[in-house]
Amino acid sequence: MAEAIATEHKYSVCTICDIGCQLRTEVKDGKLERVIAHDHPQLAKNVCYKGIAAPHIHNHAERLTVPLKRVGARGEDKWEEISYEQAMDEIAERLQKVVDEHGPEALAVSTSGWNTQTTHSMDRRFMNALGTPNYISGVSLCAGNTAAVNKLTYGWFVGADIMNSKCIVLFGHNPRKHSWTPIFNAINVARQNGAKVIVLDPRVSDQAETADLHLRLRAGTDAAMCFGWLKVIIDEKLYDEEFVKNWTVGFEEFCERVNEYPLERVAEITGVDAELIAEAARAYATAESACIPWTPITDMQISSTSAIRLHSILRALTGNLDVAGGELLGGFNPNYVPESKLGYHELLSEEQRAKQLGSDLHPAYTYRAQDMLGDATEKVWGYRYADIVMGCYMANPSATFRAMETGDPYKVKAFITLGNNTLLSYPNQHQIYRGLMNQDLIVAHEIFMTPTAMLADYVLPGDVFSERNHVADSWSWRSGLTLSQKAVEPPENCTGTFQFWRDLAHRMGFGNHFPWDTVEELLDYRLEPSGQTFEEFQANNFMYSEPPEYKKYEKIGFATPSGKVELKSSILDELGFDPLPYYREGPAVSAEYPYYVFTGVREDAFFQTGQRQVEVLRKRSPSPKLFMHPTDAAREGIADGDWASLETETGQVKAKVSVQESMKEGHIRVPHGWWYPELRGSQLLAGAFVSSDAVLCPDAPEFLDHEQGIPHFKGFPGRVVKMIEPPAGMSEQVLNG
Ligand SMILES: Nc1nc2c(c(=O)[nH]1)N[C@H]1C(S)=C(S)[C@@H](COP(=O)(O)OP(=O)(O)OC[C@H]3O[C@@H](n4cnc5c(=O)[nH]c(N)nc54)[C@H](O)[C@@H]3O)O[C@H]1N2
Ligand SMILES: Nc1nc2c(c(=O)[nH]1)N[C@H]1C(S)=C(S)[C@@H](COP(=O)(O)OP(=O)(O)OC[C@H]3O[C@@H](n4cnc5c(=O)[nH]c(N)nc54)[C@H](O)[C@@H]3O)O[C@H]1N2
Ligand code: SF4
Ligand SMILES: [Mo]
């Protein structure tokens, strides 16, 4: 047995995906040797094969370890190796020049922060000190925007108490053994304790296969489905009348809106039988406790804001807020200074806030809407800002890329991207590309040479989770604190994102806002309320959680302007939007584009656009796959394993077809995030335009969710064309995979 190879071990939070399992990291001769599950029996199942592959990622031959400066044309991928000091000096000088010429708002920053192990909000702190509001992130399509919209309704982003629940409702969400493993494990525990599971998914997903009820709705119709459930719940008086009376505003008007959605109408929109809709609604509303765990599916639809609000309202009306097995309003951890404070939003002037890109058309998760919650947030939760999952107070990505290209409404000429493969991670990749090509300065902080990094002027090599200390607080979402220990030293020139912002601020004359020299000093500061230093915390805890306190709202109210759950949103009203939720149809299919296309169904082998260069993972999934139903494939003359081109009015991608009975007819799934590291040097940006879903989805304002400016990734029209030849230059592994 290959046991006991390690001489030393630590506990580190895996950041290969964003769910953050705490794993045992084993070191030999100063090198990360093995990563396995935690020894604690309660955590032993929380590991997937990506986590175990960490040594293959962290010790990968292609990992970036030296700062690079562009020498060829932008995107040509030609570099000179330089020192960290030289890189930082030049970046500071060039950024200052952009600021002097165009103002601080000419800097935009993109990050998702998961893999850089939270940013400690140092990016926001830097930006607020400099004076730019133009921060964008992948969380605008994933949890961050749900956080912002949840706050509009009940003042915090709830976290589902899955483990203790008796009814779990998954709107498309499909956790598996190797995809968000801890959630998968929690669902299994709840099931063993008698929980029912209801899945709403066009496909027969893994969760749908074992579900008690499966509603195969048409993609993009989740908001309409919620109305169907609410119609049943209200008509049959299955709601919590006491709670509605004492703790909500706008119930009567909300009921009128719900009455616009009789079950027959909902059945017609969603394609699900009215009786089944009613059965599911009753099962949810009458369960002893029930939860609708957050799902990214409703984060990426044209009715996104309404769908998220409707989930919130379902939770509230059925009495599931802040109760065991329902949805917990966590609040800030009292023992840890939250990112919301570290971000130092107070530094940004009203004038600069008002310039936040996209806040005119789509204000819901920008400063414009979120600032309206400031007083209530401070009163209930103790801080003025609640930057949960980094997701509030952000610019709109589509508006930002447009400004980067066109200079409208003003010029954006410097772009810094950290742990985010920007080019592939938002809608309308061609627009992103044009925006990036029009920059005076691009800096990428990365661990691999991605298509986005190839477009940069400077590429800084990042450290990885086994090489840094951290205390994870789930992005202020839940109340637990999890220790993450440095197991090995990073390669000499690899730094964390904290160091990057700190060093840049010191060079640009506002180092006074960054008084910490090391991440450990910052962690000491963050842990001050606990009375412990980082050293003490790591000696005493591997995980720390405050015991849950239920129904806190009875003492402190909800952090909304009314102090109640706003079924009718006063903030949306004030901003000129419909204050009640509604359903809006996405762009229609046509004879030319007859299929509903959705992106996603995450691949077990990778996280998002990452890891395609890691052989142990790539061999599990060598090529991108379009999923089609057998009837649709036959109609198109396409067989399993054929290459096909999926086309929309915005762009086209090429991938192999996987014919699956489990697909819903009339729907096609496109995978997310494909590029080909092995094509570096032979194809433009390592094949970044061949198979990436980001080229497909339009993002002109009429295609976006009104309130937040979210693209419709779930059910846009497309057509599929069989290819006679596979795309040029593909390896045998891709062709045969
Ligand atoms: N078109 C399209 N866009 C999407 C989605 C979609 O389905 N389609 N999905 C959305 C969703 S759900 C999400 S969560 C976001 C995800 O967006 P991101 O979180 O940006 O996801 P990744 O594609 O994994 O990009 C992360 C990058 O960070 C690098 N990296 C990994 N670890 C480290 C590290 O420790 N330090 C540094 N400096 N870099 C590191 C990786 O090499 C990788 O290139 O994307 C969103 N965007
Ligand atoms: N291995 C691995 N695990 C991951 C990730 C990864 O990249 N790799 N990414 C992580 C991240 S950041 C995220 S956000 C999650 C995403 O993971 P999930 O929440 O599971 O979401 P998806 O895998 O995108 O899609 C889930 C299901 O939604 C269905 N679906 C598609 N369109 C619709 C629709 O309009 N309505 C409804 N109700 N259902 C629909 C699909 O058929 C699919 O079965 O996975 C996380 N886990
Ligand atoms: S599910 Fe896998 S990749 Fe995600 S944090 Fe856990 S071990 Fe890491
Ligand atoms: Mo995500």
Image (cartoon, helix red, strand yellow):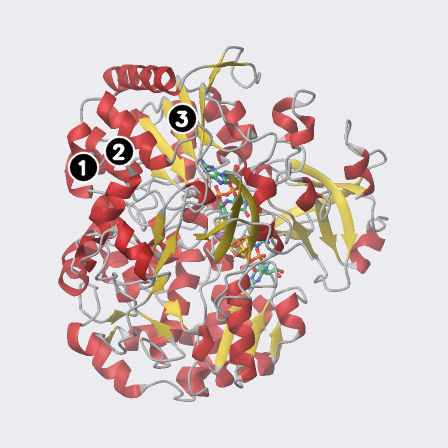
Residue 455 visible in rendering = yes
Picture coordinates of residue 422 (x, y %)? Answer: 48, 35
Label 3 beta carbon within 8 A of ligand 1: no
Image-based side of 133 in relation to 299, left or right: left
State which tag comes first along the sequence, 2 or 1: 2
Q: Amino acid at mark 2?
A: Met
- Asked if marks 3 and 1 touch (Cβ < 8 Å), the reply is no
> Which residue bears the numbered disc 1?
348
The answer to which of 540 and 709 lies nearer the viewer is 540
> Which residue bears the numbered disc 3?
404
Image-based side of 427 in relation to 176, left or right: left
**Which mark is on residue 734?**
none
Q: Using the image, determine if residue 334 lies above or below residue 316.
A: above
> Which residue bears the numbered disc 2?
127
Assign the C terminus to one quadrant of the image.
top right
> Are there few (<14), some (14-19), or many (20+) residues within 10 Å of tag 3?
many
Callout 1: helix, strand or loop?
loop
